[in-house]
Image (cartoon, helix red, strand yellow):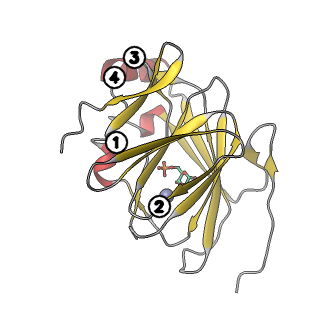
């Protein structure tokens, strides 16, 4: 049986200090996910920049366990589209998730299977509830690292499926120095 434990977030960097696993997502692991392919290719040819890092505590992927991780999205854009996570549905579609904003400014874009979308800005202290059945992706809309804590059932599973090719109904882009939602041309339903 797993024993109780604690971990700690460094609020100045937004990172989890005593993580067990770290996942690095660089531009090269996000092929086809940003709308402007030409700019993406130019950026990747120059440098395979880090887009986001996920600092995880290890818990068994079993019903009843709560996985928790801190994600740090670096500041940056591909064209006018903010750096973002891949985004996923849960394999167990009826599993919810909680995000808590730690550092920086960002947002969460969600979609359900009917193609409806929902967007909320996240700042330090914001608690976002990802309802069951909603896919979720976060974006960094600021000039510094955007960090948040995620808590979710450890056996929820990640379903990247069509999101890797098509994405979300809306793109989160910078317009006149502000985040705006625009229609995703690849998303047709
Ligand atoms: C959060 C959680 C994780 C997820 C991570 C990165 O920390 O939702 O489950 O893996 O963000 O998001 P993604 O897997 O969509 O790239
Ligand atoms: Zn999730």
N-terminal label among 1 and 4: 4
Mark 1 neighbour class, 10 Å CA radius: few under 14, some 14 to 19, many 20 or more = many
Report if the CB atoms under discs 3 and 4 are less than 8 Å apart: no
Q: Give me the disc on residue 42.
A: 3
Relative horizontal placement of residue 105, taking residue 34 as reference (left or right)? right
Q: CA distance from mark 3 to mark 4?
A: 10 Å
Element carrying mark 3: helix
Residue count near mark 2 (Cα–Cα under 10 Å), binned few <14, some 14–19, many ≥20: some
Dot 4, crowdedness within 10 Å: few (<14), some or many (≥20)?
Answer: few
Residue 11 shows in this picture: yes
Question: Which residue is labeled 2 in the image?
Answer: 131
Task: Identify the residue position indicated by label 1 in the image.
Answer: 168
First in sequence: mark 1 or mark 2? 2
What residue sits 41% from the left and 38% below the top? 30
Position of 44 relative to 166 (above/below) = above
* Tag nearer the camera, 3 or 1: 1
Whether 101 is drawn above or below 63: the answer is above
Q: Distance from label 3 to label 2 (Cα)?
A: 37 Å
- Observer able to see residue 33: no
Which residue is label 4 attached to?
36
Q: Which comes sooner in the sequence, label 3 or label 2?
A: 3
Instruction: Return the x and y of residue 186 as percentages of the image width and height.
Output: 23, 34
Whole-angstrom CA distance, mark 1 to mark 2, is 16 Å
């Amino acid at each position: 049986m797993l024993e109780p434990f604690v971990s700690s977030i460094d609020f100045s960097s937004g990172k989890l200090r005593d993580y067990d696993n770290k996942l690095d997502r660089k531009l090269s692991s996000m092929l086809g996910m940003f709308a402007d392919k030409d700019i993406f290719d130019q950026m990747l040819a120059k440098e395979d920049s880090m887009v986001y890092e996920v600092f995880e505590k290890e818990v068994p992927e079993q019903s009843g366990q709560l996985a928790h991780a801190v994600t740090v999205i670096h500041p940056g854009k591909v064209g006018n589209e903010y750096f973002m996570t891949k985004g996923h549905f849960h394999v167990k579609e009826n599993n919810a998730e909680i995000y808590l904003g730690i550092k920086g400014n960002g947002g969460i874009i969600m979609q359900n299977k009917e193609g409806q979308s929902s967007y909320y800005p996240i700042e330090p202290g914001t608690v976002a509830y990802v309802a069951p059945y909603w896919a979720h992706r976060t974006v960094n809309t600021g000039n510094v690292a955007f960090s948040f804590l995620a808590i979710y059932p450890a056996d929820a599973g990640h379903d990247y499926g069509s999101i890797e090719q098509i994405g979300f109904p809306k793109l989160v882009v910078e317009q006149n120095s502000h985040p705006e939602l625009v229609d995703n041309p690849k998303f047709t339903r």
